[in-house]
Amino acid sequence: LFAVTAISLYLLAPALIAVFGAFDELDEINPLWFVAMVALQVGSFACMWGILRLAVRAHQWLPVILSQLAANSFARVVPGGLATVGAVQYAMLVRAGVPSAAAASGITASALVVFATLLALPLLALPAIVTGVAVDPDLARAALAGAIVFVLMVVVGAASVIWDRPLELIGRAAQAVINRFRRHHEPIQGLPERLLHERDIVVAILGRQWWEALLLAAGRWVLDYLTLIAALYAVGAEPRASLVLLAFCAAQLLGTLPLTPGGLGFVEAGLTGTLALAGVGAGAAVVATLAYRLVSFWLPIPAGAVAAVIHRRRYGAEEVEPPPTPESAPRRTQS
């Protein structure tokens, strides 16, 4: 993993140098924009804490907050992707007194909810792209666009939980697209059934609180998206909101690649390129990317280090048994 990371960072060095080379230009940004971006990121993290607390059925907030901050920070300095986050979170939650079975199933459920809502974001941007809706110069209109995205995410997510048909249609469409690009490979089958099965696992773990997790998952991404919007307004850019949403989704998906910690390099290269396609000038795209990544990627790292120290002093560092194998949840009968 370290060898792959070193090679990846070497190949992505030009993009990283271009982004960090704009560090001096951050002085031109009004400090109040950074206050707004930090506040939005705190809200985004708070949504993650709420989802994880519901999923692991924890009574206290402190173990959830400390484990999420520390695991998130660890994954950004060590390659390994989502597996690293899950392993660190599981160990810290169990040390804090959360039952091992609840920790394992809860981490899995929360990850599925958060990732599923991320995959739904590009679908919500398509109507705006077709109609050509752009960001209004008034910042309040941009915030309204974020509120609309939030509502649409909740509606689509709720429909996918209540009825099977939406997930079946999404699974079939995704399966057809994937097989179209894999003509020389064995075609993928059963994707709609797999989506329904994973949906049932999440609902079985969350129970009647699935709608709360859905609201929090939507809020997690919308607040992060508004952080990028704030960074763009801070540098004087006024791009199309729909294309910024697609650029944001691409950056988040690149961030899940386990080739570099937190997608370092991949996100910078992808975000600057997609923002340029969204109508942002090359210089503004680089500065906005740097400001956004400083707040969303680099700032949480020292916060996670502090959280790890606090957790170790409060709960110790004894060995933890590996997570149990999750049992498959039964399919729900549809009313």
Image: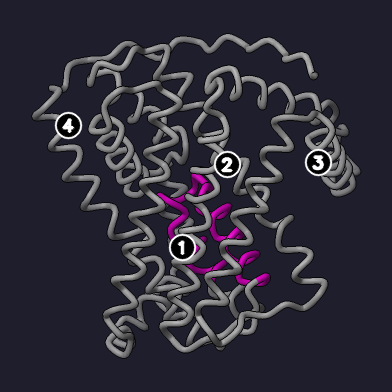
Q: Which residue is mark 1?
A: 265
Labels 1 & 4 near each other (Cβ < 8 A): no
- Seen from this angle, which residue lies furthest left? 313
CA gap, disc 3 and disc 2:
15 Å
SS for tag 3? Answer: helix
Figure quadrant of residue 71: top left
Please state the horizontal and vertical placement of residue 43, each as a whole percent of the image: 37, 54
CA gap, disc 3 and disc 1:
31 Å
| Quarter in which the N terminus is drawn | top left
CA gap, disc 1 and disc 4:
30 Å
Q: Which residue is mark 3?
A: 170
Residue 311 has which mark? 4
Figure quadrant of residue 83: top left
Q: Foreground mark, 2 or 1?
A: 2
SS for tag 2? Answer: helix
Q: Residues within 10 Å of mark 4 (few under 14, many from 20)?
A: many
Q: In the displayed structure, would residue 72 be above or below residue 228?
A: above
CA gap, disc 2 and disc 1:
21 Å
Q: In the displayed structure, would residue 139 be above or below residue 310?
A: below
Please state the horizontal and vertical placement of residue 249, each as a whole percent of the image: 60, 58
| Sequence order check, earlier mark of 3 and 1 | 3
Q: Amino acid at mark 4?
A: His
Q: Which residue is mark 2?
A: 115
Please state the horizontal and vertical placement of residue 21, each as a whole percent of the image: 35, 81
Span of residues in magenta: 242-271
What residue is rendered at 43% in x and 51% in y? 262
